[in-house]
Amino acid sequence: MFAASAVNAENVTDFRMCRNTNCKVTDVFIDPCPEALEEKPCELPQTVNASITFKYKPKFGSASPRTRLYAETVFLDLPFLDMDTNACLYTNCPIMKDTEQNWLYKLFVSKNYPKARYTVKLKFWDDGPTALETDQCCFRFNITIV
């Protein structure tokens, strides 16, 4: 899953981990994103299908992980509403503690998304009955919708 998706993608090196995250993220690729070669935010045209792939190693496990992609604003994080929150659609489940795994998300950049620069936050967490608040993984990166 991961290798096939990253073939034409560019390695995004300027991503940042969120505060209070409980995982390690590596090898972030976004396709299309030729801007990553110059360490600039990816420019994603409206109506394009973009893929976001990465490797992660969580410090928690989850049989029922949830996920969300957000655009950060000054006051609150605005979710991309067309993302299904079932994380098992994007990675193998169950998520295994201390085991490197792959993630693949296909983002359709809707015409409804305003053309602007965004800091995007990708977050997933354990949604099980015994989950702790710290059972989450989160990182941020910049994109520009053109």
Image (cartoon, rainbow, N blue to C red):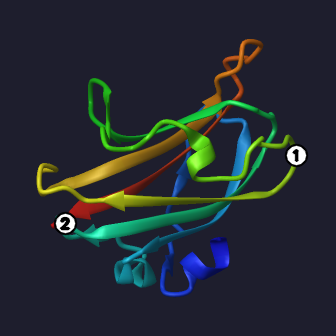
Image quadrant where residue 66 sits: top right
Q: Please, what is the three-letter code of the amino acid marked with disc 1?
A: Asp
Q: Which type of secondary structure does the marked residue at label 2 adopt? A: loop
- The mark found on residue 131 in the picture is none
Indicate left or right for 145 with 53 as reference.
Answer: left
Residue 14: where, in percent of width, then height? 50, 64
Of tags 2 and 1, the one toward the viewer is: 2
Identify the mark nearer the N-term, 2 or 1: 2
The extreme top residue here reads: 129
* Quadrant placement of the C terminus: bottom left
Q: Residue at x 25, y 59 (%)?
A: 109
Mark sitting on residue 98: 1
Q: Residue at x 80, y 34 (%)?
A: 60
Image coordinates for residue 6, horizontal then vertical, percent: 56, 79
Q: Which quarter of the figure has residue 34?
A: bottom left
Residue 116 in the figure: left or right of residue 106? left
- Reply above or below: 84 against 113: above
Q: Residue at x 60, y 81 (%)?
A: 4
For marks 2 and 1, give the CA distance: 37 Å
Question: Taking 130 as reference, is 106 above or below it?
Answer: below
Q: Give the structural element (helix, strand or loop) at label 1.
A: loop
Q: Is residue 134 left or right of residue 68?
A: right
Quickly name the residue at label 2: 47
The three-letter code of the residue at mark 2 reads: Thr
